[in-house]
Amino acid sequence: MFDVKEIRSQFPMFKQKMQGKPLVFLDSASTTFKPQCVIDAITNYYTNATSNSHRGDYDLAYVVDKTVRETRQAVARFVNSKENEVVFTNGDTSSLNIFAYAYGLKNLKENDEIVLSESEHASNLLPWFQVSKMTGAKIVYVPLNEEGRITVDNIQKVVNKNTKVVSLAHVGNVMGYRIDVEKIAAICHSFGAIFVVDGAQSVPHFKTDFKKWDIDVLTFSGHKMCGPTGIGCLIAKEELLNNIDPVFVGGGMNETFFKPNNMIPFDAPSKFEAGTLNVAGIFGLKAAIEFLESIGMDNIEQYELELHEYVIKKLEGSNIVIYNKTADSGILTFNVPGRFPQDEATYLNYKGIAVRSGLHCDKLLPDFLKVNATCRASFYFYTTKEEIDYLVDCLLDGGDILDAYFN
Amino acid sequence: MPTLTNEMMRSIIMDHYSSPLHKHVPSEEGYEKWHMHSDNCIDDLNIYLKVENGKVVDACFDGVACTISTASTDIMCEVVIGKTTDEAKFAIEQYNHMIHEEPFDADVIDEAIAFINTSKQAARIRCATIGWNAADNILKDK
């Protein structure tokens, strides 16, 4: 498949220690480490290629424009969309906000329905909350099944002729379940609704096929796929992009403007890219995509599922409460009985392990899980089985949480 | 105050976490409330202080909190009760100095000395100070 140890040697962060111990980074659902090639690409822009895009008449500017174009092509290849369906944004949250406002304010009205779920990240809920308040459109939550999954059957129960938008994460950031985007897209389209897929936790982890799945919108962040922070993409079908208006306007997105208040925007995607792009981020994103492609998305997917199965097996029979035994991703959500999740995370920090505790930006899901908070360990292709062994040992060693302060 | 061993400090924290003395809502009128919510922990606390004639006559709290925030808030209540507002503010200031590894006056913070190692777990500084900052907010104009 691939040599995890060799891959890890390309990530400078793995040389770091935490609490004087080897760093075990199990928070990749939050953000990922960057390989040297991505760091080099960003440094290359600042060291050798700094200039603005779209507006230079000199050699340096040409190099930047060329790289921006090549990155757009790389993204299109990576998710199987058209090049002009790729809009560069600041990240997944930015993509979802831009789309929700651009589409929602133009197309939604009272009694229209927006379908969301309780297992969404704040970034796929709050923009729609705002749009719902501004337009009078109603938010409908698709019920989760007893496992916490969004099923096609339950989608069928809530999507109807009033539904205008269905917006769901392809993989939930807490439970790590995958939804059947192809079938959901077909249901949405049969009622004339559009289907927005938050790909923050899916695009980095398995092969995306925007065209084949026939979804209308896809959003994701670069930093969760070994790329830089501050860069992400909004992918939307060409005709959809052509029919919505930019939320941000300014330089670089218009053909012309004239008095008193008229502006003619460029065609998509440029009309959504006002102001100077995150050029360094774009250089880094291209390197990240090429890096992931060199490992192979199918390999990454297979390895992460193997890691999840491995950890579940290791914890079998223990007292650790696992909320997502059947997750289709490298996400493990758990609690240690009798221990407050933050305390457990601090204890693990003391052992050199980075995990997340809390609500993971999903403040609706605790109602479903009936807990105040959870711990989350999330794996990526650079996670080793030895790291998982160490996590399990630390979870089961029964150490006093105050060791973190007094040893 | 006598020097505390690590074992003594551990048991102070665990006692105040497992059996907090002041974790309840006020049973009478006259308390001022301050709500604190931590952005890096799920700590979500209400702190209540009753100030009469320039003196903190009672303090209590309720909500959801981790070991460090529960125990430190409970001890904060112990520390400020019976102090004048100025003395209480001074104690809070000294506690914050200790948390941030600056010189501090140990005499006025009593059992809160148990949190002297908080900086070892920097991500939990917020938890160790949440109740103290709430009390400081209530007292700042008094």
Image: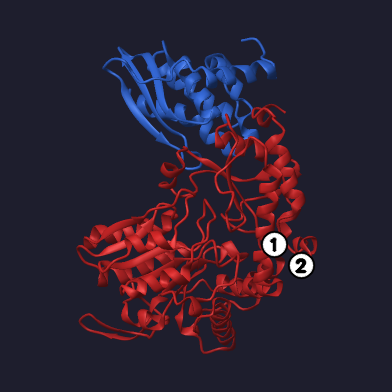
Decide: marks 1, 2 in contact (CB < 8 A)? yes
Chain under numbered label 1: A
- Asked if residue A248 shows in the view, the reply is no
Q: Judge whether A243 appears above or below B25 on screen.
A: below
Residue of label 1: A303
- Asked if residue A102 shows in the view, the reply is yes
Q: Could you say where residue B71 lies in the image, as x and y percent from the top left?
A: 52, 23
The chain displayed red equals: A
Residue A106 shown left or right of residue A231 in the figure: left
Checking the image for residue A2, the label placed there is 2
Q: Judge whether A280 appears above or below A157 on screen.
A: below
Which of the image's four quarters has the C terminus of chain A?
top right
Residue A35 shown left or right of residue A64 in the figure: right
Q: Judge whether A218 appears above or below A348 on screen.
A: below
Classify mark 1: helix, strand or loop. Answer: helix
Q: Could you say where residue A248 lies in the image, as x and y percent from the top left?
A: 35, 71
Residue A257 shown left or right of residue A364 in the figure: left
In the figure, what tint was chain B given? blue
